[in-house]
Image (cartoon, helix red, strand yellow):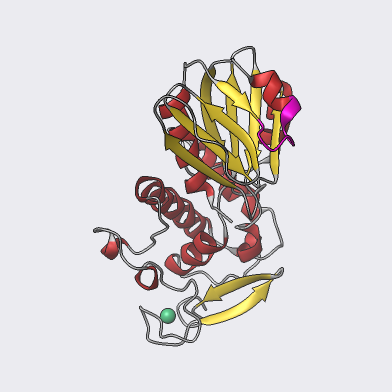
């Protein structure tokens, strides 16, 4: 499943290609025909991401909400003269005179009012990729974790605690903070939570820029191969890059969890 950095990239791309243009919006597959009809010929004002959800505002206060889920995918392409025929199950097509975006297989694709959007975003935790000049979002994250008896490993995957983190960033953020995934949220120090938040901001910005998840800052040049991008994610059985001990794997709420028992005691 894409983590928040990809959704921020999609929002950015939609703005670049389509903001303020005349758009044809359709549902070649038909499952979003009603919504497409509502949006057709409206101008895109701005697309934004909150965690793993994308909200695109169109004129007349109509909002498109997309959640990709596990299988959803955006495809972007440019064309001259006529747009190419849709391939496969295209739920939503947004087309300007030169570019198109095809959305396939999302978990959610719907048109909402601003009130409905607020209802959804008010339930989400803070997103490390949204601006936070007064550090209120950081504090909000710390408060949410500190109130909970649930393990911090589970809390980082909960979109109501912090929005946009998935399995890769969860594992890597905890490793970088030297924090055991099994400690209850309320027993994690606020210094460690600050570190986790600060690293989430930094690493996810790298993700937006590069289009890949990369959590080792000594590997920022170019595009390192997948095996070199992480400290612990999918490295079970291999030796820890810091201590040489063995990286472990466990199941936490049916998701694979990777950690170094020595560095994250
Ligand atoms: Zn280690």
Residue at image point 53% right, 39% down: 137
Question: Which residue occupies the extreme left position in the image?
Answer: 221
Ligand 1: image quarter: bottom left
Image coordinates for residue 171, horizontal then vertical, percent: 52, 67
Q: Quadrant of residue 123?
A: top right
Q: Nearer the viewer, residue 35 or 233?
A: 35
Image coordinates for residue 85, horizontal then vertical, percent: 55, 36
Specify start and end residues of the magenta stretch as a single range. Answer: 27-34
Name the main secondary structure of what is drawn in magenta.
loop
Residue at image point 34% right, 68% down: 225
Q: Quadrant of residue 257?
A: bottom right
Q: Is residue 68 left or right of residue 84?
A: right
Residue at image point 52% right, 47% down: 4
Image coordinates for residue 115, horizontal then vertical, percent: 72, 22
Q: Quadrant of residue 258?
A: bottom right
Question: Which residue occupies the extreme top position in the image?
Answer: 60
């Amino acid at each position: 499943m894409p983590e928040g950095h990809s959704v921020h990239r999609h929002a950015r791309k939609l703005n670049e290609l389509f903001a303020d243009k005349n758009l044809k919006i359709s549902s070649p597959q038909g499952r979003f025909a009603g919504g497409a009809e509502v949006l057709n010929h409206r101008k895109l004002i701005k697309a934004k991401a909150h965690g793993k959800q994308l909200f695109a505002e169109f004129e007349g206060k109509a909002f498109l909400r997309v959640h990709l889920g596990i299988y959803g995918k955006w495809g972007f392409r440019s064309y001259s003269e006529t747009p190419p025929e849709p391939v496969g199950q295209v739920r939503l097509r947004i087309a300007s005179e030169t570019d198109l975006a095809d959305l396939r297989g999302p978990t959610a694709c719907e048109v909402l009012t601003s009130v409905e959007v607020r209802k959804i975003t008010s339930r989400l935790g803070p997103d490390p990729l949204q601006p936070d000049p007064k550090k209120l979002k950081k504090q909000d994250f710390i408060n949410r974790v500190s109130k909970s008896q649930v393990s911090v490993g589970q809390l980082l995957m909960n979109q109501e605690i912090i929005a946009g983190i998935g399995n890769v960033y969860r594992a890597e953020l905890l490793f970088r903070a030297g924090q055991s995934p099994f400690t209850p949220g309320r027993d994690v120090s606020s210094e460690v939570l600050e570190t986790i938040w600060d690293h989430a901001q930094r690493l996810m910005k790298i993700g937006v820029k590069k289009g890949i998840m990369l959590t080792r800052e000594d590997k920022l040049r170019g595009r390192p191969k997948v095996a070199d991008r992480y400290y612990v994610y999918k490295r079970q059985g291999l030796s820890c890059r810091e201590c040489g001990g063995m990286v472990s794997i466990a199941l936490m709420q049916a998701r694979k969890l990777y950690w170094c028992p020595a560095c994250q005691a």
